[in-house]
Amino acid sequence: MSKVQTMSLPTPQPLAQASGTRAVWRRLGRHLPHYALLSLLAVITVYPFWWTLVTALSTTGDIYRFPPPLWPQDPSLDNFIEVFNTIKLITFYKTSVLIAAATVVGTLVICSLAAYPLARMEFAGKRIVFGAIIATMILPAEINFLVNFITIAKFNLVDTIAGVVLPNLAGAVGIFLMKQAFEAVPGDLIDAARIDGANEWQIYWQIMLPLAKPALGALTILTMVSAWNQYIWPSVVMTNPDNFPLSVGVQYLSSAFSSKTRVVAAGAVLTILPMLIVFLFTQRFFLRGFDGAVK
């Protein structure tokens, strides 16, 4: 008696393609509102900088017309050249770089040293200390200006880079970020290091800091952008125009060229561009650094 072999019939190709197409459209329909919202947010975020760049590159046309132009009219670099010829741009750049670098190094050291005992040591009043640090986040930075200026004046640091840098070295955001990163390190690893005879300094330097590199990278970017863009405090501390950082020095374009908005826009572009480039090349480190801080 012969065996009857049954064979499954293949799905017709047009039917399979139609089913796959419907699945693609269903996925697209689910994600379309998210893409639309993200696109809208991207336009709102990018447009001010784009308008400033278009204004800086344009040499003709009404910059205040509505709707505003999306592309430069008679593009030229003359406005940027005029900025270099009017203010000491290179000197301002050097001062801003020194302030940003010193602030970044000091913040990484102080915030990590403050976060380590809060994350890995037990002592009386630990929660109170951490709560007080976090509570400072609700206070505006300007509330400390008077006390900080009196302190800086007592130490004869007015009109110096140190006077701009020192009050900004320890921040609640940096301590919180590093504390969360240190708490994510497995406790067994630290216990093993202690059993091997490592002291607290060796654990901090040889174990905690290498494992917290993503958080250190994120804190570096946050601190660098903040130090580069700060305006009010350097304008209070600095009195000699030759010592101004870029964010303060660019204000001379407004006074010297009150009617030349395109030159002011060119100065603003030159101020923003370095940090924009830094962030574009380091954004993946920035996002990785917040993985341990957001739970």
Image (cartoon, rainbow, N blue to C red):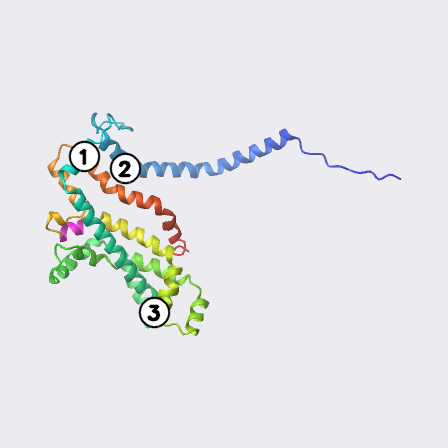
Amino acid type, mark 3: Trp
- What residue is pinned by disc 3? 201
- What residue is pinned by disc 2? 49
- Identify the residue at image location x=31%, y=53%: 220
Q: CA distance from mark 1 to mark 2?
A: 19 Å
Judged left or right of residue 60, residue 124 is right
Task: Using the rendered view, name the quadrant where residue 147 is placed.
Answer: bottom left
* Residue 24 to residue 183: above or below: above
Q: Nearer the viewer, residue 259 or 228?
A: 228
In this rendering, the label closer to the viewer, 1 or 3:
1
Q: Could you tell me residue 48's position as x and y percent?
A: 27, 36
Residue 150: tell me if it is visible: yes
Amino acid type, mark 2: Phe
* Range drawn in magenta: 232-237
- The disc placed on residue 81 is 1
In this rendering, the label closer to the viewer, 1 or 2:
1
Q: Nearer the viewer, residue 208 or 145?
A: 208
* Residue 158 to residue 83: above or below: below
Q: Earlier in the sequence, mark 2 or mark 3?
A: 2
Q: Earlier in the sequence, mark 1 or mark 3?
A: 1
* Residue 59 to residue 271: above or below: above
